[in-house]
Image (tube, coloured by chain):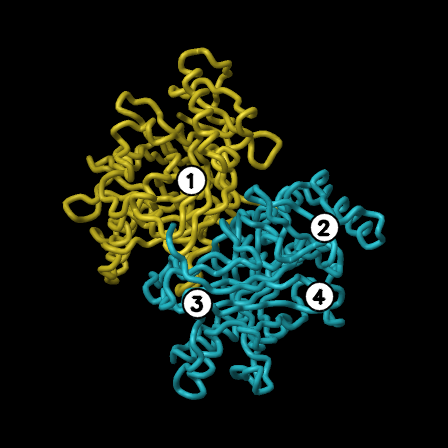
Chain colours: A cyan, B yellow
Amino acid sequence: MKLATLKDSTRDGRLVVVSKDLTRCSEVGHIARTLQAALDDWRHVGPRLAGVAEGLETGAQPSMRFHEHEAASPLPRAYQRVVGAAYVNHIELERKARGVEMPGSFWTDPLICQSGSGSFLAPRESIMVADEAWDIDFEGEVAVIVDDVQMGASVEQARDVIRLVMLANDVSLRGLVPAEPTKGSGLFQSRPSTALSPLAVTPDELGEAWDGGKLQLPLLVSLNGQPFGRANAGVDMTFDFGQLVAHAARTRPLVAGSIIGSGSMSNRLDGGPGKPVGEGGVGYSCITEIRMAETIEKGAAATPFLNFGDRVRMEMQDGDGHSIFGAIEQTVAKYEKA
Amino acid sequence: MKLATLKDSTRDGRLVVVSKDLTRCSEVGHIARTLQAALDDWRHVGPRLAGVAEGLETGAQPSMRFHEHEAASPLPRAYQRVVGAAYVNHIELERKARGVEMPGSFWTDPLICQSGSGSFLAPRESIMVADEAWDIDFEGEVAVIVDDVQMGASVEQARDVIRLVMLANDVSLRGLVPAEPTKGSGLFQSRPSTALSPLAVTPDELGEAWDGGKLQLPLLVSLNGQPFGRANAGVDMTFDFGQLVAHAARTRPLVAGSIIGSGSMSNRLDGGPGKPVGEGGVGYSCITEIRMAETIEKGAAATPFLNFGDRVRMEMQDGDGHSIFGAIEQTVAKYEKA
């Protein structure tokens, strides 16, 4: 089943079930007004929503047109978000570009960050930044939404509570990173609001592309209409979502509706950095990575960070070329304080 | 006005207005079912709740007994939490004990962390930890709940949106810190669920003890019934709540209901670490700090971290010895996975 949240006058929007082809949707306020309300009682609400989804495909269910641009992020605000660094290749390249060695433990112990979840951008909402000099970057990733996870859950238990899968653009302000404290506290100002894809879909909707912990499909990233990346989310993902969730739940329970992101996607090429799409490679899921590759190969980064007016697009398609999650499509714009 | 959340069968409990002396409370489900619902529309709801609070004091308002042990944390789950390191003295001592120099910028740039907010412990709920060897510690702090904060808000604007003040016990697992990645990602597993005080109170309730950004009162911390700390929250707080909130809002808006914590409280003595309460000092707000003082003064830490069965209590009293926020009172217990 595919779920979306339509923008309305409330902070959490209203939940709708969307048809597989993303053209139609059904109101489900009588079952659950919001996605968080559905997740709060998934055992009872999930099957009822699945019934609506079935009726939507057969035509038995009243429906209306669905427009991606009317969607908020599936959870406009969430109680918990964790972002991993599951594509360790990305971290290794970053260290290599800086000439610093990466601890070997990074290949065996998942690295996760407590991340902001109070204000997600809508999938078509502008990325508002006060200053271009903050080196604005996107980061394409896959994210899952889990049910309640008990403290100490095993990897297998963690895989079983993954309820929904979606895409995320984890916007970063790379220029603010050096000024953030480096020890213990993590990044904050350099990690502004993230955007999620219009649709969050149940794992069964992904067929064989979902193996229980990874999504075996390329993320199509474009910048100003030009292909920028098509890295496969299932390739070089050192830690799957079950491992990330279990790692996050080691010392605390996770509340239903918690979002776990993969971190910036990254595929290797011959053990090293990938090649741009224009040169036949799978490209990159963030600007930082192409800059790291340029630094390693040519001694200096050449690709600029985002400027005001730049457009970023992220999408994933099934084998027939149909959009699975709808598209994240954002323009970078100058933020002026009201 | 004083607000509390009573535990019930729902995830967010139900909001009540509590009398100034903490003995009685009034149901306000007809105004706002939960504290988050009240914060979502504070402009309209706040004055109505204040009317109930007034009626509660005059006896015009129907009421019932209030018992602190029936209270959940004011927000059992929240959309955003930021914890600062406002008492820079604490950080400096920690570095000194390790023989490492602290960057001077720590005195001028607030250090803040994205913190977990998905599952707060109730004020009397046990601190469940799987392993004593993880070096279990408490951290006494003051925390505020803000209204919506626009991106780029000034310090003055940030002070104006502080709606509620409360206490927090930011539980830490010090033994897990060394294994957490040290760069960029911050702490996660070593920061399990936090407990909040039974009451969250509006700043006007604090009288002259609240100067708009700091609370000028001692936090009474006891361990197994013995006084452990009475550091004054208004002393040596290098950054006030207005500064912490503005720092957090520099590159993103903060959603109504966001919690901003001060970080572990710490008062200096003659420019150095404080003395234990038993030796006439104001003591400490966490075990780590007394261990740092011991390390600096005697070459080695002597005070042990918490063991299963240990009891921690935190409270703040007004000039007449009345409890302002009720007490956080927690026992450490062994967590066994179900």
Q: Secondary structure at mark 2?
A: strand
| Badge 4 element | loop
Q: Which residue is mark 1?
A: B147
The circle on residue A211 is: 4
The answer for how far apart the CA atoms under marks 4 and 2 are is 24 Å
Tell me if mark 3 has few (under 14), some (14-19) or many (20+) residues whose alpha carbon lies within 10 angstroms of its own. Answer: some
Residue that numbered label 2 is attached to: A17
Judged by depth in the image, the label closer to the viewer, 4 or 2, is 2
Residue B85 lies, with reference to residue A266, above or below; the image says: above
Work out whether disc 1 and disc 3 sit on a shared chain.
Answer: no
A13 and A161: which is toward the camera: A13
Residue at point 46%, 74% (across, down): A288
Amino acid of disc 3 = Phe
- Tell me the CA gap for discs 2 and 3: 35 Å
Q: Is residue A99 left or right of residue A38?
A: left
Name the amino acid, label 1: Asp
**Is disc 3 on the same chain as disc 4?**
yes
